[in-house]
Amino acid sequence: MTERARISVAIVDAETSGNVGTVARAMKNFGFKDLLLIDPPPYGPGTEAAGFAGRARADVLAEATELTFDALVESYHTIAFTSMTTSGDTKHIRYPVDTPDALAERLNGVDQSVALVFGRERIGLTNDELARMDELCSIPADPTYPVLNLGQAATIALYELRSLTLGDTQLPDDPHKCASPIEVEALFDHIDSFLDTIAYPPERREKTEIMFRRVLGRTDLTPREVSTLHGVFRCCEQLLDRHDLGQPQE
Amino acid sequence: MTERARISVAIVDAETSGNVGTVARAMKNFGFKDLLLIDPPPYGPGTEAAGFAGRARADVLAEATELTFDALVESYHTIAFTSMTTSGDTKHIRYPVDTPDALAERLNGVDQSVALVFGRERIGLTNDELARMDELCSIPADPTYPVLNLGQAATIALYELRSLTLGDTQLPDDPHKCASPIEVEALFDHIDSFLDTIAYPPERREKTEIMFRRVLGRTDLTPREVSTLHGVFRCCEQLLDRHDLGQPQE
């Protein structure tokens, strides 16, 4: 197990209890533990936060730390998530920004206490708050409506940064393991001999073989699917055999 | 403008009106328009859905289409989003799965009517429903808690698939434009001459120059930042000049 970055998640002045719960749930889904709350709404048992947090209510939410904005800035390398606006004379406060995928790459191997900082619902972080952040990050979106909900922005950010916190995911290493070329070729051979067995019309033979190759070639068959297809042809062959209907194979 | 894939988003039997709104908002954030609802909760004006949808309430949500599960399966190439479970004899229903980033790549250029299908909150899609889907996709997450909330799963999926629907995002082509090596070298030259001007101790000179090079080299300075740093040194130089305090430059 390699050492991983210490990454906390901070929410500044959230209005909606449910959003705090949504962020806590995303943290647990993607391997983050340390939730920092600045001027939070109620988030104890029975609140919307507890309802939205799912199984994160027992750890991430229950163990959240309340602190001041000053303490946040002093104790962490702060990365603010903000909707991109480049207008007017605040541009130097709001530029340059990273995207979440670029941030995941940059933070890989960085050894410091990082806080991902999310602002209040309607107005995000103020320019004064943004000016005190060490870095900015913005989620690419439709230019006609790039303003994400707080909980949704945090969900995407934590999903993108999961490689910094998770050793493994629930998915197998290859969630779509393809059959080897040898296995696939053996299937095509079986199809060939099956076409012999059923005395497929010679004049349509070539086009049909190509069709099988094209269709099955596009589908990235798994070993199990290859095996199942063999089974289908074999089942049919055995039925024909039992009734002496198949064409004899040389 | 190139032709882009026709991608709809379907929600099957959602319990919570707010989740329908969250999905609608994410659709508008990431350039999706066509929302399909199977057995939906109330989502008209004044409902939680309308509140959570933000500016998507006027188009994505208002123009949503209600249809049956049978109609969905018959009219679209269906891609189900499901939490990955590989246990027991339903494995053939739930495997193989794609990940959202692999799906974005695969669907690029595909010319068909695709529906991204999200299931109900607590149990997702049933095995019977999954068996009728054309493809499966699962979001990689912490194996100890891989079950995402419906709205959060859809938000991540639509974020990952945004390249299929959005020509541009609100971010500039390069949201972090770096200064050129020539600009950065000119800054180091300026620092050198500045150190001369302030008669920096010769025995510390080399290490300090290296320090500047390392620190500024790591930060991917923007042209504006380079220009601002020049300005800081220049300001100091001019002050020293006015008081005849600077060391004369050869």
Image (cartoon, coloured by chain):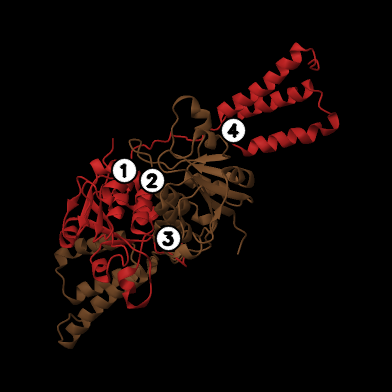
Chain colours: A brown, B red
- In the image, which disc is placed on residue B54? 1
Which amino acid, by three-letter code, is at mark 3? Ala
* In the image, residue B85 above or below residue A48: below
Between the residue at mark 3 and the residue at mark 1, the CA separation in whole angstroms equals 23 Å
Nearer to us in this view, B30 or B97: B30
Between the residue at mark 2 and the residue at mark 3, the CA separation in whole angstroms equals 19 Å
Q: Which residue is mark 2?
A: A149
Between the residue at mark 2 and the residue at mark 1, the CA separation in whole angstroms equals 8 Å
Secondary element type, mark 4:
loop
Which amino acid, by three-letter code, is at mark 1? Gly
Q: Residue at x 34, y 43 (%)?
A: B29
Q: Are marks 3 and 1 in contact (CB under 8 Å)?
A: no
Between the residue at mark 4 and the residue at mark 2, the CA separation in whole angstroms equals 31 Å
Q: Residue at x 40, y 66 (%)?
A: A177
In which quadrant of the rendered view does residue A79 lie?
Answer: top right
Can you tell which of label 3 and label 4 is closer to the viewer?
3
Q: Which residue is mark 4?
A: B221
Which amino acid, by three-letter code, is at mark 2? Asn
- On the image, the x and y values in percent for residue A135 come to 55, 40
Secondary element type, mark 1:
helix
- On the image, the x and y values in percent for residue A137 come to 49, 41
Q: Which residue is mark 3?
A: A50
Chain bearing mark 4: B
